[in-house]
Amino acid sequence: MSNRKDISVAVVGLGWMGQAHSRSLIRIPTLFPERKFNPILTVCADFDLNRGKQAVEDFGFKRSTTDWNEAVAAPDVDAVWVCAPNMLHIPIIKAASEAGKIVFSEKPIGGKPEQTLEAFNIAKKNKTFTGVGYNYLWAPLVLHAKKMIASGELGDIIHYKGRFFSMYGSDELGLLSWRFKFDQAGYGVSSDILSHSVSLAQFLIGDITEVVGMRQTTIKQRPLPSNNSSHYSRGKKGDPLGEVENEDFASMLCRFKNGATGTFETSRTVVGPESENMFEIYGTKGALKWNHESLNELLYYKKDEILESGFTKILGGDRFDYHGAFVPGQGNSLGTEDLICIEDYSFLNSWVTGVEFKPSFAEALEVVSVQKALIKSWESKSWEMV
C-alpha cells in the first residue's frame, strides 16, 4: 500500500526489552496487513559493541552507535524506544522529546516517582506523543476482562487482589546488577514489578485514593559483578559482596475511588512463582481471575441461582481482540512478546491515526503517584493519600 507511512525508529538499549521491541517492530508488517504504517529499524544505541553488531547483523538495523545522544537526535529518526536502565530514562527522554521525536519508554520511567513527573512535564512542554511499556494490559483476555467489568457483568466491584511474584532475584549468588543499586535502578520491586500490578488495577478498576504498606530487603548482599558479566550471570561462594540498596518485597493495602478495597504483594526473591503477575477481581455478581503464567486463560465465576457453581475457564482465541493476528482458532496460545507486539502496533497506529494512546506518560504518573504514597507510608507506618 503506497499510502503507508514509513516510521523510522531508534532503539536505545538492546537488552531483553530492547530486543523484544525490535522483534515486535520487525513482526508488525507480517501480522497486521491493514496497518497504515511501516516501522523501519534505523539505529540502535548500546554501549556494548557486540550488541551493536547484533543489532545490524541479526535485527536488521541500518546502523548502530555507542552514543545514545547521536541516535535520538538523528534527523532520520521519527520515534525513539527507551529500553535503557531506569536512571538513564530521563536524559534520553528529554533529548528525544526536545528533538521532536515520539517517545515510547519502558516502565517505570526513571527509578523514582519524581523522575516520572519530570518526564511527564518534559513531554507536556514539548507536546510529545508518548507511550509506556505496561505490556500486560494488552493481553487479549485482560482486554476482555475490562469489557466484562465495564458492561456490568461483575456488578459493583468490591475487592481487587494484585500480585506479582517473580524469582529473578531469588538466587543469593545472583550478581549485584544495576537493578539492585539505587543510583541505577532507583527503588526495587515497587518500581520494577509492582508498577505492573498497579497499572493493571488502574486500567481495570480505576483510581486508587489511599494506601498503606511495608517493604523488606530479604537478600541484603550479592556478589559483585566482573567486567564481562551480564545481568543474569551468577557469582560463586567466596566472591566479594556488595550491599543491595533497594527493596526485594513490598505489600500494600489500598482503597479505590469507586469504594472497592485492594491488596497487593510483590517480590523478586520468593521461591515458587516464576512470573506470577495476577489479579483477582470480586464483584457483587461475579468474579474474575487471571495469571500471566497462564495468560491464555481467564477464570470467570457468575453468581446465579442455579445449583451449578465454580469458576468457568475461558480460553484465549481469535474471537478476542488482537489474538487472531497471531494465531487462528480457539485455545491456541500467545506468548509474552506477542503482548509487546500488540503494544507497539497500538502505539504507532494511534500516532498515525491521530488517536490518543494509553498508557502514556500520564498513566505512568498515576502509577508512580500510588508508589509515592506507598513509600511515604513505609516511613509513617500509616495510611497515606495518593
Image (tube, rainbow, N blue to C red):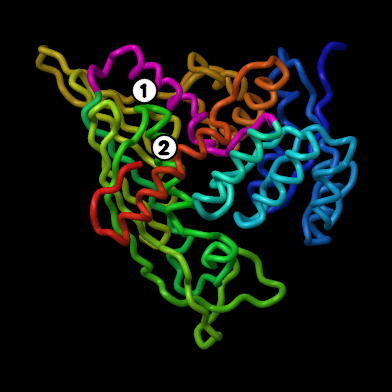
Instruction: Tell me if residue 53 comes above or below residue 20 in the rendering.
Output: below
In the rendered picture of this protein, how many numbered marks are placed on residues? 2
State the quadrant of the N terminus.
top right
Residue 314 is labelled as 1
Amino acid bearing label 1: Ile
The answer to if 293 sits in the magenta stretch is: no
- Residue 120: horizontal and vertical position, in percent? 59, 39
Amino acid bearing label 2: Ser
Q: Earlier in the sequence, mark 1 or mark 2?
A: 2
Extent of the magenta region: 127-156
How dense is the environment of label 1, judged by Cα within 10 Å: few (below 14), some, or many (20 and up)? few
For residue 162, which quarter of the picture? top left
Closest to the observer, 114 or 253:
114
User: What residue is shown at x 27% (from left), y 50% (from top)?
Assistant: 212
- The residue wearing badge 2 is 294
Name the side, left or right, on which 77 lies relative to 195.
right
Q: Does residue 376 appear anywhere in the picture?
A: yes
Name the side, left or right, on which 117 lies relative to 130.
left
- Residue 223: horizontal and vertical position, in percent? 54, 78
User: What residue is shown at x 10% (from left), y 12% (from top)?
Assistant: 305
- Residue 189: horizontal and vertical position, in percent? 44, 56
User: What residue is shown at x 57% (from left), y 36% (from top)?
Assistant: 361
Check the image and name the residue furthest to the bottom.
Answer: 238
Residue 363 is labelled as none
Q: Does residue 57 appear anywhere in the picture?
A: no
